[in-house]
Amino acid sequence: MSNLDTRSGLAAKQTWCEDCDNVHPASRKREPYYWLCMRFPRLEGHGFVSRKYWTDQEPYMRCNGINGGRCATFKPIPERATKTERDDK
């Protein structure tokens, strides 16, 4: 069963990046603002915030600019990994 609403192409329910397996593991160790989505590689030469920052830094786009609450690329973290992460806290 798909997580997508066939009419809109968006997720059928709310999605949270903290529950998504597409968040880059190293970025997940930082504050959520810095989390990177591995489904969206950085676009070379198209970052208009800073000429150096976008092209010299992060390999993926940040999650907060992608997920609007119904992310079409959402992939749930496997249940076993979720339990392990909660036990570590």
Image (cartoon, rainbow, N blue to C red):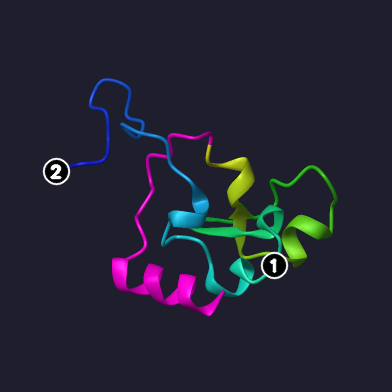
Q: Which residues are magenta?
A: 68-89
Closest to the observer: 77 or 34? Answer: 77
Q: In this rendering, is residue 20 above or below 85?
A: above
* Residue name at image x 27 percent, y 35 percent: 4
Label 1 CA crowd tier, 10 Å (few <14, some 14–19, many 20+): few
Quadrant of the image containing the N terminus: top left
Quarter occupied by residue 78: bottom left
Which amino acid type is shown beneath numbered disc 2? Met
The dot on residue 30 is: 1
What percent of the width, then of the height, locates residue 57?
A: 74, 66
Which amino acid type is shown beneath numbered disc 1? Arg
On the picture, is 56 further left or further right than 19?
Answer: right
* Residue name at image x 84 percent, y 53 percent: 51
Q: Secondary structure at mark 2?
A: loop
Q: In this rendering, is residue 6 above or below 27?
A: above
On the picture, is 2 further left or further right than 20?
Answer: left
Specify the farthest residue to the left: 1
Residue 26 magenta: no
What percent of the width, then of the height, locates residue 15?
A: 43, 42
Q: Which residue is mark 2?
A: 1
On the picture, is 70 further left or further right than 5?
Answer: right
Which circle's residue, 1 or 2, is located before the other in the chain?
Answer: 2
